[in-house]
Amino acid sequence: MLWLVGVPIGREGDMTPHAVDILKSADVIAAEDTRKALRLFGIHDITPDKLLSHGAHNEHSSVKGIVNLLMEGKTVAYVSDAGMPCISDPGFLLVRAARAAGIDVKASGGTSALTMGVALSGLSSDRFTFLGFLPRQNKARETLVGTVKELPFSLVIYEAPHRILETLADVERLLGDRNCFVGRELTKTYEEHLTGALSEVKASLENRKEVLGEFVVVIDGAVEGSHLLTDEGLESEILSLLGDGHKVKKIRDMLKEKTPLSGAELYKKIETLKS
């Protein structure tokens, strides 16, 4: 198992008892800066059996060795210099590799589902956008999601159990079938992590008798060109706008940012579909 252990951002006394217990019992501790970690460990009487370096300077090269230890059945705890690992700190490469290897990943010491969700997601965590609970009204929801559709940052959403399926469906419709992490009941007895495409996670939840718990959803950011329509999608949009009575020039102006076609090529395509 891989534990992501949040440590104090300043006062050493802010360390939680649960975090201390994990660090004391771990087979291996990986740290962003081993010297800083040892100073903190000395205050809390933590003596690592094995301490490894895993920081920005070596995270690409050290991931394989740590994952090998996890595959051997070792419990590894990871700490960054301060706060929750992965939140603008090293760690997400390790989480992603651990999840790809089928390793269970948990977090401790977090006081916010936001930071814990982002840390556990294995998605890019250098920058992310927090949307909180999405608006209940369809128009307001579409407007909000539309404003972040093209951002290359991970998106974080909170949701209640009775709305999670609807939200996942709406987000897939508005953003596409992106990779995501869904955390349920983080730090509680029935904590659960679901990863995969939005459609896959939604299907998994739909197959349950009932869906319980509070959710944090982390969604992969946009990739370059992801806002562009496919040929089929472009034709569908054109036909829909023609059906609504829009002029060819107006449709061209409305869709020119959604296609790699030049203005002249797009105009010609609209004229062809109109006829």
Image (cartoon, rainbow, N blue to C red):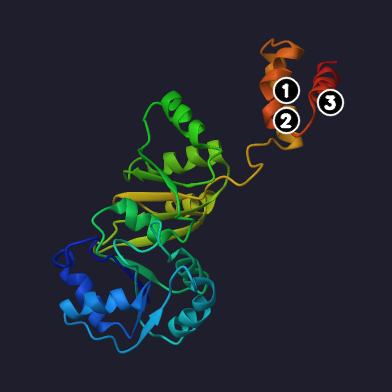
**What number is the disc on residue 141?**
none
Contact check, label 2 and label 1, Cβ < 8 Å: yes
Mark yes or no: residue 211 visible: no
* Residue nearest the viewer, comparing 157 with 85: 85
Secondary structure at badge 2 equals helix
Residue at the disc numbered 2: 234
Secondary structure at badge 3 equals helix
- Tell me if 96 is positioned left or right of 112 in this view: right
Identify whether 110 is placed above or below 98. Answer: above
Secondary structure at badge 1 equals helix
User: Marks 3 and 1: which is nearer the front?
Assistant: 3
Please identify the residue farthest to the left as the structure is shown. 13
- Which residue: 79% across, 24% down? 266
Q: Which quarter shows the C terminus?
A: top right
Q: Residue 78, position in %: x, y? A: 35, 73
Q: Which quarter shows the N terminus?
A: bottom left
- Tell me if 62 is positioned left or right of 23 in this view: right
Amino acid under disc 1: Ile
Q: Residue 198, position in %: x, y? A: 51, 49
Residue at the disc numbered 1: 238
In three-dimensional space, the C-alpha distance between marks 2 and 3, rounded to whole angstroms, equals 13 Å
Residue at the disc numbered 3: 265
- State how many labels appear: 3
Please identify the residue farthest to the bottom as the structure is shown. 49
Amino acid under disc 2: Leu
User: Marks 2 and 3: which is nearer the front?
Assistant: 3
- Which residue: 22% across, 78% down? 41
Mark yes or no: residue 59 visible: yes
Amino acid under disc 3: Glu
